[in-house]
Amino acid sequence: MSASDLEKGKFFEYKGDVWQVMRKSLISVGTHSHTKLVFTVCDINGKKERDITMGHNERVDMIDILKKKANVIAKTDSGLQIMDAVSYETLDATTEKDILESINEGDEIIYVDYKGVRVLGKKKN
């Protein structure tokens, strides 16, 4: 897909990382009013934000990522064991150290399943 087809909220892969589009704008460059796209994006965890400039016809890989709910069954040294809230499937998940410390057994969490299950954080009540 071309960069001009990206819209707010969509996920795409750029230089090996997964990004979500937060804002999209146009800038003029050069003396002949050529335009480029500027995307303000954040990483899959929603923590790291940056701007990416692309031409209208640059190719990007669109990724379909769904955020899902699950319950924490058990905490281990290497991650979590969770149960999907809809399918009741048991999964092994990884997460960042600070998120792991804030989660307890029985908590409801938000996760994504892309190249391995990754917990994004605790569900807010």
Image (cartoon, rainbow, N blue to C red):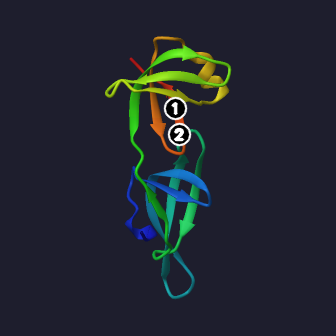
Residue at image x 57%, y 57%? 51
> Please, is residue 100 above or below residue 32 in the view?
above
In x, y percent, where is residue 77?
68, 19
Please state which of residues 96 and 93 is positioned toward the viewer in this rendering: 93
| 29 with respect to 10 (left or right) | right
Q: Residues within 10 Å of mark 1 (few under 14, many from 20)?
A: many
User: Helix, strand, or loop for circle 2?
Assistant: loop
| Nearest to the observer: residue 107 or residue 92 | 92
Q: Position of residue 83 (x, y in %)?
A: 43, 22
The type of residue carrying mark 1 is Leu
- Closer to viewer: mark 1 or mark 2: 1
Q: Quadrant of the N terminus?
A: bottom left
Q: Residue furthest bottom?
A: 32
- Looking at the image, which residue is at 38% across and 17% down? 125
* Residue name at image x 48 percent, y 17 percent: 72
Cβ–Cβ under 8 Å for marks 1 and 2: yes
- Binning the other alpha carbons within 10 Å of mark 2 as few (below 14), some (14 to 19) or many (20 upward) gives few
Residue 85 on image: x %, y % = 35, 24
C-alpha separation, residue under disc 1 versus residue under disc 2? 8 Å
Residue 66 located left or right of residue 102: left
Residue tagged 2: 46
Q: Is residue 29 above or below residue 124?
A: below
Residues 44 and 94: in front is: 94
Q: Amino acid at mark 2?
A: Gly
Residue pointed to by mark 1:
120
Label 1, secondary structure: give it.
strand
Q: What x and y, as percent, mark residue 81?
A: 53, 21
> Is residue 30 shown above or below 13?
below
